[in-house]
Amino acid sequence: VSKELLCLRLENATGIESPPEYRTQRMQFQVDQLARRMKTGETQDAAQVPQLLRQWCFIGPVPATHVAAMRARFERARTAVGTVALVA
């Protein structure tokens, strides 16, 4: 899992918009998730938010040119969830 995909999953789970330049990837992610859920009966990503937040710490670095943008996306999604999710 890349930090970019992790941000997409967090943005989707928290219901916040992804940056415009990621609109196509977000739409593809949502289509893939819907297809998977229809097959497996799996629940929404919202139930996985605490795990997604923890994964951020264990994923390797991103290229220096993307650090600020990725961190901003992550922080925006984390704020949307609230700090309670970090304890779960």
Image (tube, rainbow, N blue to C red):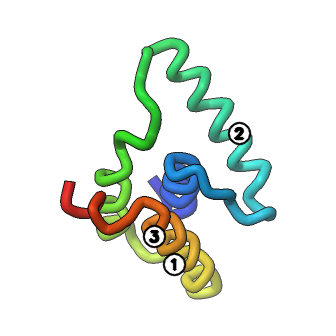
Q: Nearer the viewer, residue 57 or 85?
A: 85
Residue type at mark 1 is: Arg
Residue type at mark 3 is: Thr
Q: Which mark is residue 71?
A: 1
Residue type at mark 2 is: Gln
Q: CA distance from mark 1 to mark 3?
A: 12 Å
User: Which residue reaches farthest left?
Assistant: 87
For marks 1 and 3 on the same chain, the one whose residue lies earlier in the sequence: 1
What residue is rendered at 50% in x and 64% in y? 77
- Kindly report which numbered mark, 1 or 3, lies closer to the viewer in this rendering: 3
The residue that label 2 is drawn on is 28
What residue is rendered at 46% in x and 33% in y? 44
Residue 38 horizontal/vertical position (percent): 54, 15
For marks 2 and 1 on the same chain, the one whose residue lies earlier in the sequence: 2
Task: Name the element at disc 2.
Answer: helix
Q: Are marks 2 and 3 in contact (CB under 8 Å)?
A: no
Q: How would you rate the neighbour count of disc 1 (Cα within 10 Å): few for under 14, some for 14-19, many for 20 or more? A: some
Q: How would you rate the neighbour count of disc 2 (Cα within 10 Å): few for under 14, some for 14-19, many for 20 or more? A: few
